[in-house]
């Protein structure tokens, strides 16, 4: 079983839509969690860390459910520039495991 | 530019040759990571240094792979006797211990083994 699993998508949504991605992880002892964004043929860049209490950064909201071992990312009012692959990342004692990514296409 | 840099950006080699990649992390970062990414997959953890000490190695890192960070600054990743299956993007990232674990990635070295 993979350490981190994500729906690969693609999610095709119109501008202005709200879209949500989920990610599950296998190790209940995982310590910290992140969402990264990766544009085509570019390096991953941190979008946001995910805290147990949930956290929001503008149009982006991340949630962590430790009991069910899943992480979510909600994007409100999607922009064309949000089109990218979103990577879920789990930290197991300084070994970082990335999901395969969920591809988002925001259409005009 | 004070970001993570990697050299070369692209490398084409023939099967059986050795290749070496270099990563220069953000100067004050004491942690350095190497990852491999293939098409349609997320980055796969290969190894991790804290200062000059190599603290973790993935099972993915076969005997043909070796990484060093001799002075706790730049790092090299060497692949000996390359195979076609080694073709991938090799990404380096750095972070600051106690800095929230945010990793900053370099642009990667794209390797093609013919």
Image (tube, coloured by chain):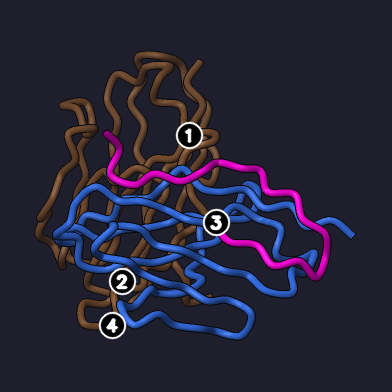
Chain colours: A blue, B brown
Classify mark 4: residues with Cα within 10 Å, few (<14), some (14-19) or many (20+): few
Q: How far apart are marks 2 and 3 (CA)?
A: 20 Å
Count all numbered tags in the image, as a single digit.
Answer: 4
Q: Name the residue under label 1.
A: B38
Query: In the image, which residues are magenta?
Result: A1-20
Chain assignment, label 3 = A
The label shown at residue B100 is none
Q: Mark 3 points at which residue?
A: A86
Observer-side mark, 3 or 1, equals 3
Residue B13 x %, y %: 47, 23
Chain assignment, label 1 = B
Chain assignment, label 2 = B
Asked if residue A8 lies in the magenta stretch, the reply is yes
Residue B105 x %, y %: 44, 61
Towards the viewer: B78 or A39: A39
Quarter of the view holding residue B19: top left
Observer-side mark, 2 or 3, equals 3
| Contact check, label 4 and label 2, Cβ < 8 Å | yes
Classify mark 1: residues with Cα within 10 Å, few (<14), some (14-19) or many (20+): some
**Residue under the image location 34 percent in, 76 percent down:** B27
Q: How far apart are marks 4 and 2 (CA)?
A: 7 Å
As drawn, the residue found furthest toward the front would be A67
Towards the viewer: B51 or B105: B105
């Amino acid at each position: 079983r993979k350490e981190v699993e994500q729906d690969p998508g693609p999610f095709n949504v119109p501008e202005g839509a709200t879209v949500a991605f989920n990610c599950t992880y296998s190790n209940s002892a995982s310590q910290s969690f992140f969402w990264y964004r990766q544009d085509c043929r570019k390096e991953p860049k941190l979008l946001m860390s995910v805290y147990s209490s949930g956290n929001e950064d503008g149009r982006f909201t991340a949630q962590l459910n430790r009991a069910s071992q899943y992480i979510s990312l909600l994007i409100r009012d999607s922009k064309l520039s949000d089109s990218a692959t979103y990577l879920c990342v789990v930290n197991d004692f300084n070994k970082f495991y990335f999901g395969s990514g969920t591809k988002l296409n925001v259409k005009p | 530019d004070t970001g993570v840099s990697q050299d070369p950006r692209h490398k084409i080699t023939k099967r059986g040759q050795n290749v070496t990649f270099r990563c220069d992390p953000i100067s004050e970062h004491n942690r350095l990571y190497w990852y491999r990414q293939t098409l349609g997959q997320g980055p796969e953890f290969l190894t991790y240094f804290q200062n000059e000490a190599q603290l973790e190695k993935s099972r993915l890192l076969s005997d043909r792979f070796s990484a060093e960070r001799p002075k706790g600054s730049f790092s090299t990743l060497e692949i000996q006797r390359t195979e076609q299956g080694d073709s991938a993007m090799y990404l380096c990232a750095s972070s600051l211990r106690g800095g929230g674990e945010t990793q900053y990635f370099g642009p990667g070295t794209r390797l093609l083994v013919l």
